[in-house]
C-alpha cells in the first residue's frame, strides 16, 4: 500500500524540519510526502529541499485558505492508496507507518485516527499541556479512546487517515477550520464508511509552548464545538457541556467564598479532591513533581478556556441565532 502523507504548513519552518526528520526514519518505506505551504510569509522551501534525497517529497505553495482546504489541495495531488494527515507540530515514531499498514491489513478502516502523547524532549509545560489534552479528568479522555463518551469516534486531523475511496466518494473538507475534522468524519460515517481508532498509531504532538497560546487554542476548540453543532445538531452531547459547567462552578466557588456562604466549605473540598486527582494521576504518568503541578494549571486552563469559548458561541449562535 502506498501512503500519501499530507502536511499543511503555515509560518512554521522549524516544525516541518523536525517532522520530516522523523519521517526519514520510518521502517515502512512505501510513502510519499506532500508539504503544502498555505500562504506563509515564513516559507520552508530551503528546509524541504534539503530532504529531497531522503524522502519522496513534493512541495507546493498556494494562497492562504486554512488547513482544511489546504488538505484538499493535497488530496487532489496525492498518488497514494491511503492519505494520512499530520499537523506540522507532530513528531512521528519510526514504526508508525508499519503499525498502520499492519492494522489496516488485519482490520480494514476507511478512516482512522490515532492518539497523541508527549515526547521525552518536550518541555515541562508541553508535557503538562499534553497531559491535560489526554487526561480522563478533562475533556481529553474523550479523544483517543475506543469508548467515546461523546458518541461516534471522530478522528482528529493532527493524526488522521482516509482511504482514496473516501476522498473519491465523499470529497474533502467543506469547512477549513473550527471543527473541520469532526464535521468531515461525521459525513464519512453517514456515507457508510468504517471509522475506528488505531490505538498504537501514536504521534508526539507538541501543541502550544506556553499557557497563553494554550488558552487561545482551547478557547477556539470550545467555539468549534458550536460550529459543528450548527452542521449536525444531534452531535452535541451532555459531555460537551462539562467545561462550561466547570467554569460556572469555579465562578460560584469564588463568589461563595467571598460572601462566606455555608456551601463554600463543601465546594472547596470538591475542588480540592479534583485537584489532587489531577496531581497524582499526572505524577503517576509523568514521574515528575514539576509536571504534576503544571498539569493542575493546564487542566484548569483547558477546561475554562474551552468552557468560555463554548458559552460565547452558544449564546451568540444558538440563543441569539447570529451567524
Image (spheres, rainbow, N blue to C red):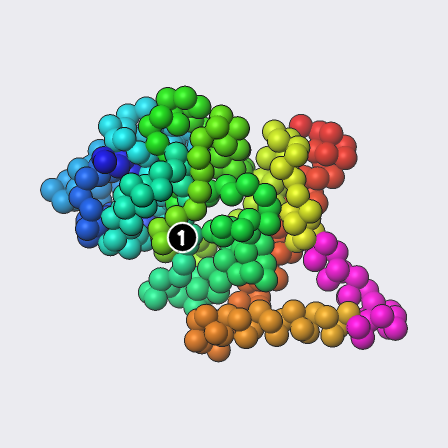
Q: Is residue 254 above or below residue 94?
A: below
Tell me the residue at 71%/29% (across/down): 322
Q: Position of residue 303 (x, y in %)?
A: 62, 56
Q: Is 46 displayed left or right of 311 in the figure?
A: left
Q: Position of residue 230 (x, y in %)?
A: 64, 31
Image quadrant occupied by the N terminus = top left
Which residue is more in the foreground, 55 or 195? 195
Tell me the residue at 41%/21% (across/down): 169
Q: Which residue sits furthest top?
A: 169
Q: Position of residue 139 (x, y in %)?
A: 58, 54
The residue where tag 1 is placed is 199
Asked if the stretch drawn in magenta spans residue 247, the answer is: yes
Q: Main secondary structure of the magenta part?
A: helix
> For the residue labelled by badge 1, is the local secondary structure a helix, a strand or a loop?
loop
Confirm whether residue 9 shows in the render: no
Q: Is 171 displayed left or right of 135 in the figure?
A: left
**In this picture, which residue range is highlighted in magenta?**
245-266
Tell me the residue at 25%/31% (across/down): 80
Q: Is 189 displayed left or right of 109 in the figure?
A: right
What is the quadrant of residue 111 in the picture? top left
Which residue is more in the foreground, 28 or 226? 28
Asked if the stretch drawn in magenta spans residue 15, the answer is: no
| Mark 1 burial class by Cα count in 10 Å: few <14, some 14-19, many 20+ | some
Q: Position of residue 67 (x, y in %)?
A: 42, 35
Amino acid at each position: 500500500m502506498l501512503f500519501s502523507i499530507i502536511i499543511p504548513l503555515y509560518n512554521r519552518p522549524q516544525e516541518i524540519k523536525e517532522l520530516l526528520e522523523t519521517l526519514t526514519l520510518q521502517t515502512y518505506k512505501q510513502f510519499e510526502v506532500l508539504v503544502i505551504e498555505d500562504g506563509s510569509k515564513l516559507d520552508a522551501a530551503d528546509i524541504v529541499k534539503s530532504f529531497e534525497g531522503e524522502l519522496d517529497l513534493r512541495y507546493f505553495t498556494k494562497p492562504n485558505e486554512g488547513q482544511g482546504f489546504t488538505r484538499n489541495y493535497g488530496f487532489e495531488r496525492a498518488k497514494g492508496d491511503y492519505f494520512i494527515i499530520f499537523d506540522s507540530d507532530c513528531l512521528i515514531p519510526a514504526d508508525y507507518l508499519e503499525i498502520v499498514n499492519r492494522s489496516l491489513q488485519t482490520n480494514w478502516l476507511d478512516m482512522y485516527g490515532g492518539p497523541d502523547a508527549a515526547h521525552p524532549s518536550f518541555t515541562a509545560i508541553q508535557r503538562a499541556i499534553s497531559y491535560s489534552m489526554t487526561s480522563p479528568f478533562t475533556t481529553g479522555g474523550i479523544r483517543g479512546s475506543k469508548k467515546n463518551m461523546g458518541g461516534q469516534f471522530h478522528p482528529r486531523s493532527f493524526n488522521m487517515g482516509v482511504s482514496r475511496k473516501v476522498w473519491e466518494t465523499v470529497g474533502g473538507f467543506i469547512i477549513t477550520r473550527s471543527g473541520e475534522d469532526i464535521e468531515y468524519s461525521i459525513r464519512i460515517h453517514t456515507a457508510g464508511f468504517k471509522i475506528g481508532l488505531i490505538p498504537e498509531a501514536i504521534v508526539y504532538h507538541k501543541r502550544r509552548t506556553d499557557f497563553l497560546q494554550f488558552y487561545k487554542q482551547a478557547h477556539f476548540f470550545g467555539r468549534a464545538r458550536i460550529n459543528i453543532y450548527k452542521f449536525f445538531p444531534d452531535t452535541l452531547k451532555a459531555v460537551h457541556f462539562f467545561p462550561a459547567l466547570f467554569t460556572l462552578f469555579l465562578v460560584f466557588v469564588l463568589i461563595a467564598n467571598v460572601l462566606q456562604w455555608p456551601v463554600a466549605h463543601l465546594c472547596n473540598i470538591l475542588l480540592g479532591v479534583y485537584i489532587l486527582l489531577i496531581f497524582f494521576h499526572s505524577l503517576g504518568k509523568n514521574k515528575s513533581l514539576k509536571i504534576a503541578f503544571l498539569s493542575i494549571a493546564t487542566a484548569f486552563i483547558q477546561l475554562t478556556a474551552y468552557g468560555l469559548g463554548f458559552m460565547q458561541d452558544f449564546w451568540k449562535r444558538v440563543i441569539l441565532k447570529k451567524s
